[in-house]
Image: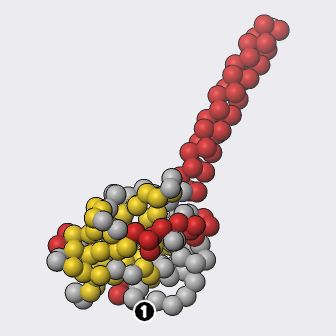
Amino acid sequence: MNDNRENNVVQTSRIISRITWLVVIASFFFQASCSRQTGHTAPSLAGSNVVVDVTALKPEVPQFFTYQYQGKNISFFVIKIDDHILSFLDACVTCYPYKQGYRYEDGVVVCRACNQRFPVYKLEKGIGNCYPIKIAGRIENGKYLIPRSSLEQESGKF
C-alpha cells in the first residue's frame, strides 16, 4: 500500500512539474507578444527617403511598414483617404511606452494598449494623446516619400 502512495506522489509531482513548465513557457510567450509591436514589411528606400508606391495603397486601409534604424524597429503606416496620402507613426504620445502600436479593423484604427478607436477619416485632424503621431511626407512621381530623418528622430518611441 505504501508503494501505491509513493507512486501516486511521484506521478503527481511529475504532473505538477510539467504544468509548472508549461505555465512558465506560456507566460514568456504572452509577455513577449504583448510587450512588442508587430514587425511589418520593410519599406523601399531611395536616398534619404522611405518610399511607398501610391498605387499599392487601398483606399482607407492603412499599410504598415517597419524601418530599421540603429537596432530599433520604427513602425509607421501610410493611408489613402479621399485622394490624400497621409502617414503616421505606429505609436501615440500616451501609449508608446507599451510598444504595441495600432491595428486596423473595418475602417477604424485601434490602439492595442488602451483600445481607443479612431475612424480612419478622422486621423488627419486627430488631436489628442492617443491619436497616431503624424509624420510628414510628400508625393513625387507616383511615390510617397517620407524623409528617413523624420522617422529617425522619433526612434525613442520604439
The kind of secondary structure element at disc 1 is: loop
The residue nearer to you, when weighing 78 against 109, is: 78
Position of 112 with respect to 123 (left or right) is right
Residue highlighted by disc 1: 125
Other-residue count near label 1 (Cα within 10 Å), few / some / many at <14 / 14–19 / ≥20: few
Residue 130: x, y in percent?
A: 55, 80
Residue 81 higher or lower than 19, as above or below: below
Residue 135 higher or lower than 72, as above or below: below
Residue 136: x, y in percent?
A: 39, 81
Position of 97 with respect to 48 (left or right) is right
Q: Residue furthest right?
A: 2
Name the quadrant containing residue 41. bottom left
**Residue 55 visible in the current orientation:** yes
Residue 1: x, y in percent?
A: 80, 8
* Amino acid residing under circle 1: Lys
Residue 80: x, y in percent?
A: 27, 80
